[in-house]
Image (cartoon, rainbow, N blue to C red):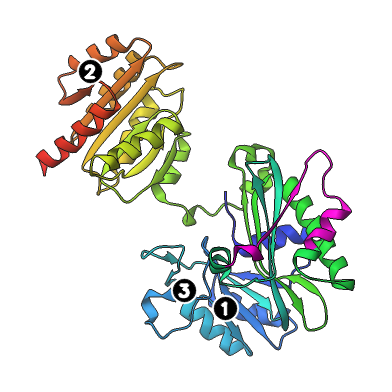
Amino acid sequence: MNIHEYQAKELLAKFGVPVPAGFAALSVEEAVAATEKLPGPLYVVKAQIHAGGRGKGKFKELGPDAKGGVRLAKTAEEVRAAATDMLGNTLVTIQTGDAGKQVNRLYVTDGVDIAKEFYLALLVNRATGRVSMVASTEGGMDIETVAHDTPEKIHSIDIDAATGFMPHHGRAVAAALELTGDLAKQAANVASKLYDAFLGTDAEQIEINPLAVTEDGKLMVLDAKVGFDGNAMFRHKDLMELRDTTEEDAMELEASKYDLAYIKLDGDIGCMVNGAGLAMATMDIIKLNGMFPANFLDVGGGANKEKVTAAFKIILADPAVKGILVNIFGGIMKCDIIAEGIVAAAKEVNLSVPLVVRLEGTNVQAGKDILANSGLAIVPANDLGDAAKKIVAEVQKAA
C-alpha cells in the first residue's frame, strides 16, 4: 500500500525525522490558505499522485510548454495560479505512462534554500534478509540515471534486524554521503529515525529524494515516498485510513476485495492461475507463442466459485482481452471444484471470448469431465505448452 508525499512526511515527522512545514490542499482556496500558515517568502506547490517524476512531468491539458507538477511560488497569487493549473488536470510522468494521473490533491510546503541534495532509501534486501539503506551523493530527479550510468555512486548498507540500527551504520551512511562534522551527526540521526519508522510501520520502502542540506547547515527531508507491506496492515488500522483508492487501478481494487492478486498488463490474453510462479510461467509461454498476457491474476490455493467468478468478471472488464487461459494445478483445491467454479462463472458472465482450460492435480479427470459435459465452448488442454498454443490459435481464429 502506498501513500501520498504529504502523508509520508507527516508520518515520518512523528518519528522525529526533520521535514519542512506543509499543508495538504484539496482545493485552490485551501492551497492559498496554506500560505498564511507558512513563514514564506518561498513556497513549493506539489501535485500529489502515486508516481515519481512529478517535477519533470507535463499536464495533458496545459500544453508542452507548461510547467510540471512541482512549482516554486513567491506569493499567494502565484500559489493560486499553480493550484489552478494542477487540480483536476492529468499529470503525465515517466512513471505514470501515457495515461497519466489526475491530480486531486496538492501539498503546499515551506520553501528551503538548498545547498546540496542526496538520496537515501530503505528497503528489504531479499538476498540477505536484512533492511538495506541505499545512499548516494547524487540526489535529485535523475537518480535512475545515476544508478544506470554510475552505479559506483550508489552505496548499500545492510542492517541485521537482530541487532538493529547501530552507531556504525550511522557513520557508514554519513560516509556514503561524504558528510563530516555536525552534518555527519545529523545524517546518522536521520538514518536512525528512518530505520525506526521503517520497522514501526512495517514499511516495504522509504525513499527520500532529495535529502537536502540547507544553506544554514540543516539536513532535511524534502520529498518522501513510503510504501507498506499489505500483509501487515491488519496491525496498522491507522495507516489503512491513509489509503487513497482513487490512485489505484479500478480492477486491481476490485480484485483486492476477493483477495485476488491481480495486476493489469498491456496484452490481449487474460490469465487465471493459482500460484505466483505458475502465473509467471503462464505469461512467459503466452509470449513465447506470439501473443501477450493482459494480466497477472493469482486466485490462490483456496479458490472457490465466488473467487473464480470474480476473477472472470475482472478479466473481462478489460476491453483488450480477446481470450482467456485458465491454468490450474489442483493441490489443496481439487480440480473438480475448480471446474465447477469455471463452468458457473462462464455461464454467469455470459462468456463471449475463447476459453482454454488446463487442469492438473487432484481429481483432474473429474474436473475435465465437468468441463466436457458443461455444454460450453471450453477448449481443454493437456499441458501448459498445449494450452498456450490453443489459446493463441483460438484468438487468431476468432479475429
Label 3 amino acid? Gly
SS category of the residue bearing label 1? helix
Quarter occupied by residue 149: bottom right
Residue at (31% x, 20% y) in the render: 359
The residue where tag 3 is placed is 57
Magenta-drawn stretch contains 152: yes
Residue at (77% x, 52% y) in the render: 195
Q: Earlier in the sequence, mark 2 or mark 3?
A: 3
Does residue 350 show up?
A: no
Left or right: 117, with 341 as reference point: right
Q: Of 66 and 236, which appears nearest the observer?
A: 66
The segment highlighted magenta reads 150-173
SS category of the residue bearing label 3? loop
Above or below 188: residue 25: below
Label 1 amino acid? Glu
Magenta-drawn stretch contains 269: no
Tell me the distance, in whole angstroms, between the alpha carbons under discs 2 and 3.
50 Å
Quarter occupied by residue 17: bottom right
The residue where tag 2 is placed is 371
Q: Where's the C terminus, which quadrant?
A: top left
Q: Nearer the viewer, mark 1 or mark 3?
A: 3
Does residue 185 show up?
A: yes
Tell me the distance, in whole angstroms, between the alpha carbons under discs 1 and 3.
24 Å
Residue at (67% x, 82% y) in the render: 35
Left or right: 178, with 58 as reference point: right
Q: Nearer the viewer, mark 1 or mark 2?
A: 2
The residue where tag 1 is placed is 29
Left or right: 283, with 333 as reference point: left
Label 2 amino acid? Leu
Q: Position of residue 369 (x, y in %)?
A: 23, 11
SS category of the residue bearing label 2? helix
